[in-house]
Image (cartoon, rainbow, N blue to C red):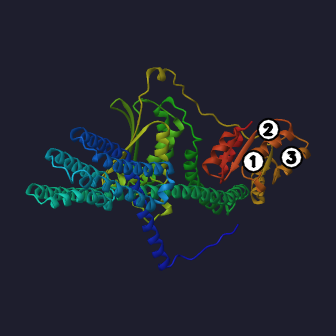
């Protein structure tokens, strides 16, 4: 197997490729014309056979002359030849279209023979005929065959004249040879009819050719579109794979940096260097928020977030939001009001809080004076949660784009201090995930309103509302032992230092074999296994936890940590049944999870 990369094609090569493309187009057009001709040959043959049979038998019955029988043998032989060619073409199937030029020549030859056979009627039958009624019947029949045949063969321009000329010319010559006034007039009429038939058949040919070319162009566009769709899907998969790999590689050192910063903050607490460490942790938190926004999109794409719809008083959620957002409002000198009016809504409290938090923070960010009001009201039989602001507003042409990823109004320069522009994209996905609707209206310079429309809460749901109470988590038991599995030494070192400052005893391992060895070597109890999802040498954190449990002989509690944000891996991690944290993990989040594990 070999692979090579060549320079772009030269101008001469491109001209040759264009000429090849034109040749292929002409071949496809010819194939389509041929298919149209030969597939319709059966209908033409049936009609012409019936007419020829009726014509010569009628002539024999009326005149008693047998000269039409000889003509009948010629015509029916030509028709049999036409049928044989059409039959052979049909049996050859699509393979015949590859040799379309050869089959077209065969068809034209049989067509010319058939037209000549019909035209011989003027020589074989009518040359010695004196009965005007018989002559008229034959002439009308020949003209009818000329008109019908010209219509049938109009797909190929040359076939029109291969049919008309040999069919009508003998009749014209025979009439002119007789020299009478009537015969000459008939000859002129036949010539006029043939000319008009040829003219209209040629016009039909042009229409058919245009239609066929349009069809071929459309087919080519469809093929090109399908190819582009395949390329776009492939590029999207490659992009997702690249982003997942890059995200994982970036999250690993970020996670280690956060661990070291957390341990350093613990050691330098109360010293002159603590403000520096605090600023460093804030910078790390900002990076973590950016990673978390992208992770939320990956979770939603993976379908691992499932809403837990329930009825609850919106007042409690408004209180939490006021506590979280009032500081930002006070800092900017803005008003912030929440109006619950005792309403009970049916939604997912956590996801709805995330949605409203994004909308309120976004409103405060783009409001310079006035304030933000969050209300709940009934609108057209629905419960409407509304976030009003007196901010800069959004232009009408930008409204459809505000929910796109990485899009920010009035931030074309992509100022990172103003966020990534992922908030409204996450809002849209979460609202749709919960089965709600989302509306936005805005007037530039006056403000914006976002509405979340949800089904009203039924009375039966209101009666089942249970108000939860906050509890104070218990402190960590300092006797707990943790087995940490991670293939990167910096993360093992940072995690061990952080956990030890929290009072944990930490066992570390870089792979499954080392982890099982640590389990067998440790004489005491192991309380928790923390493992990275993607380990070195294609080892897997989920499999590592299973092997550790087998070596320990008990179903140890486990926590998965991963920097892989591809939808497939996110879904797989959640389906494992273990608690999952995504790198970089903030120390307070890790601390909260560890406190919740018995």
* Image quarter of the N terminus: bottom right
The numbered disc on residue 516 is 3
Q: Nearer the viewer, mark 2 or mark 1?
A: 1
Residue 19 position, x and y percent, is 44, 72
Residue 115, percent from left and from top? 31, 55
The image quarter containing residue 248 is bottom right
Residue 276 location in percent, x, y?
Answer: 64, 63
- Position of residue 506 in the picture relative to residue 303 (left or right): right
* CA gap, disc 2 and disc 1: 14 Å
**Quadrant of the drawing holding the C terminus:** top right
CB under 8 Å between callouts 3 and 2? no
Residue 419 visible in the current orientation: no
**Residue at the disc numbered 2:** 556
Tag 2 secondary structure: loop
Q: Earlier in the sequence, mark 2 or mark 1?
A: 1
* In this view, 463 is above or below 55: above
The residue wearing badge 1 is 541
Taking depth in this image into account, of 508 and 150 the one nearest to the observer is 150
- Determine the CA span between mark 3 and mark 2: 13 Å
The kind of secondary structure element at disc 1 is helix
- Count of labels shown? 3
Q: Label 2 crowding class (10 Å Cα cut-off): few <14, some 14-19, many 20+?
A: some
Residue in the picture at 79% in, 49% down: 484
Q: Earlier in the sequence, mark 3 or mark 2?
A: 3
Rendered position, 449 above or below 189 = above
Closer-to-camera residue (189/359): 189
């Amino acid at each position: 197997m070999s692979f090579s990369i060549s320079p772009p094609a030269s101008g001469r090569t491109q001209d040759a490729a264009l000429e090849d493309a034109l040749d292929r187009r002409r071949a496809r057009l010819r194939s389509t014309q041929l298919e149209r001709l030969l597939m319709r040959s059966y209908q033409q043959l049936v009609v012409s056979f019936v007419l020829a049979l009726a014509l010569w038998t009628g002539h024999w019955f009326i005149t008693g002359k047998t000269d039409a029988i000889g003509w009948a043998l010629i015509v029916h032989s030509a028709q049999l030849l036409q049928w044989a060619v059409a039959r052979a073409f049909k049996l050859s199937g699509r393979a015949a279209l590859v040799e379309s030029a050869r089959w077209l020549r065969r068809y034209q030859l049989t067509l010319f023979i058939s037209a000549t056979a019909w035209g011989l009627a003027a020589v074989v039958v009518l040359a010695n005929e004196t009965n005007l009624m018989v002559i008229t019947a034959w002439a009308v029949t020949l003209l009818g065959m000329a008109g019908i045949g010209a219509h049938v063969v109009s797909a190929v321009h040359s076939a029109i004249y291969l049919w008309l000329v040999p069919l009508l010319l003998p009749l014209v010559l025979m009439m002119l040879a007789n020299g009478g006034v009537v015969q000459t007039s008939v000859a002129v009429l036949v010539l006029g009819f043939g000319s008009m038939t040829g003219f209209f058949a040629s016009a039909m040919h042009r229409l058919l050719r245009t239609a066929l070319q349009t069809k071929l162009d459309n087919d080519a566009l469809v093929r090109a579109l399908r190819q582009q769709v395949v390329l776009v899907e492939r590029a999207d998969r490659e992009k997702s794979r690249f982003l997942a790999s890059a995200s994982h590689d970036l999250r690993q050192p970020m996670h280690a940096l956060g661990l070291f910063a957390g341990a350093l903050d613990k050691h330098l607490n109360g010293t002159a260097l603590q403000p520096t460490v605090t600023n460093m942790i804030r910078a790390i938190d900002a990076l973590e928020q950016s990673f978390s926004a992208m992770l939320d999109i990956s979770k939603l794409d993976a379908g691992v977030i499932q809403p837990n719809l329930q009825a609850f008083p919106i007042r409690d959620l408004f209180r939490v939001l006021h506590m979280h957002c009032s500081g930002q409002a006070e800092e900017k000198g803005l008003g912030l009001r929440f109006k619950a009016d005792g309403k009970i809504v049916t939604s997912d409290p956590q996801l709805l809080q995330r949605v409203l938090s994004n909308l309120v923070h976004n409103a405060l960010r783009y409001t310079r004076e006035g304030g933000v009001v969050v209300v709940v009201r009934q609108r057209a039989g629905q419960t409407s949660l509304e976030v009003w602001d007196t901010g800069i507003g959004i232009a009408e042409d930008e409204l459809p784009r505000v929910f796109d990823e990485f899009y920010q109004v009035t931030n074309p320069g992509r100022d990172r201090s103003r966020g990534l522009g992922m908030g409204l994209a996450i809002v849209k996905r979460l609202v749709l995930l919960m089965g709600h609707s989302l509306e936005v209206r805005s007037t530039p310079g006056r403000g914006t309103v976002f509405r979340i429309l949800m089904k009203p809460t039924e009375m039966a749901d209101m009666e089942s509302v249970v108000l939860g109470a906050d509890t104070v988590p218990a402190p960590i038991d300092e006797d707990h032992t943790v087995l940490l599995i991670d293939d990167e030494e910096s993360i093992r070192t940072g995690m061990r230092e952080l956990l030890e400052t929290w009072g944990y005893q930490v066992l570390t391992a870089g792979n499954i074999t080392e982890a099982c060895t640590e389990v067998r070597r440790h004489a005491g109890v192991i309380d928790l296994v923390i493992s990275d999802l993607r380990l070195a040498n294609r080892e897997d954190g989920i499999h590592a936890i299973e092997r550790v449990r087998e070596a320990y002989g008990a179903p140890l509690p486990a926590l998965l940590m991963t920097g892989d944000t591809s939808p497939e891996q996110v879904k797989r991690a959640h389906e494992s049944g273990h608690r999952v944290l995504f790198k970089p993990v903030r120390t307070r989040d890790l601390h909260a999870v560890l406190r919740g594990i018995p």
